[in-house]
Image: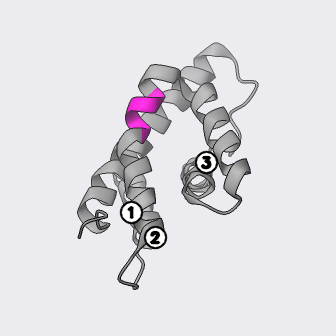
Amino acid sequence: MSLEAKIAGKAKELVAACIESNKEHPKETAYRALCESFPILLRTCGLANTLGYLDAKSGENGDDEYATLRAHLRQQLAQLGFSADPGGLATADYMLYSRLALRIAMWHKRLAQALLRKKDE
């Protein structure tokens, strides 16, 4: 199985777990919105700053979409055989983690758009 297929398969599993059965679906909507902005955040701020942002935002509300996305990223990296915490890496390793995180983010975005509802749906 290729790296891309592993990322896509795990992303589908994780995003599908966020589907809510209730009519309001606020967590589903919030997670979808965060997934849609996640690749842009990684490109503009970098991996370390993005992870810091997710940590800071999840600290405000506890168990929310920020903590969920951070946990999903860690699960994806672990499934691929990488350390779940990319802090303190050498430059070459950091670049590899950044590229992997961007691939993961793109699959989460695609699948969130395909599987999760918007606020007005």
Quadrant assignment, res 43: top left
Decide which of tag 3 and tag 2 comes sooner along the chain: 2
Residue at position x 67%, y 63% in the image: 63
The residue that disc 1 covers is 29
Quarter containing the C terminus: bottom left
* Amino acid of disc 1: Thr
Q: Nearer the viewer, mark 2 or mark 1?
A: 1
Residue at position x 47%, y 36% from top?
Answer: 100
Q: Quadrant of the N terminus?
A: bottom left
**Mark positioned earlier in the residue sequence (2 or 1):** 2
Neighbour tally class for label 1: few under 14, some 14-19, many 20 plus, Cα within 10 Å: many
Residue 55 quadrant = top right
Give the residue at mark 2. Answer: 18
In the rendered image, the vertical position of residue 87 relative to residue 9, given as above or below: above
Q: Which residues are magenta?
A: 38-42
**Residue position for label 3:** 81
SS class, disc 1: helix
User: Which residue sits at x=62%, y=50%?
Assistant: 74
Q: Position of residue 40 (x, y in %)?
A: 38, 31
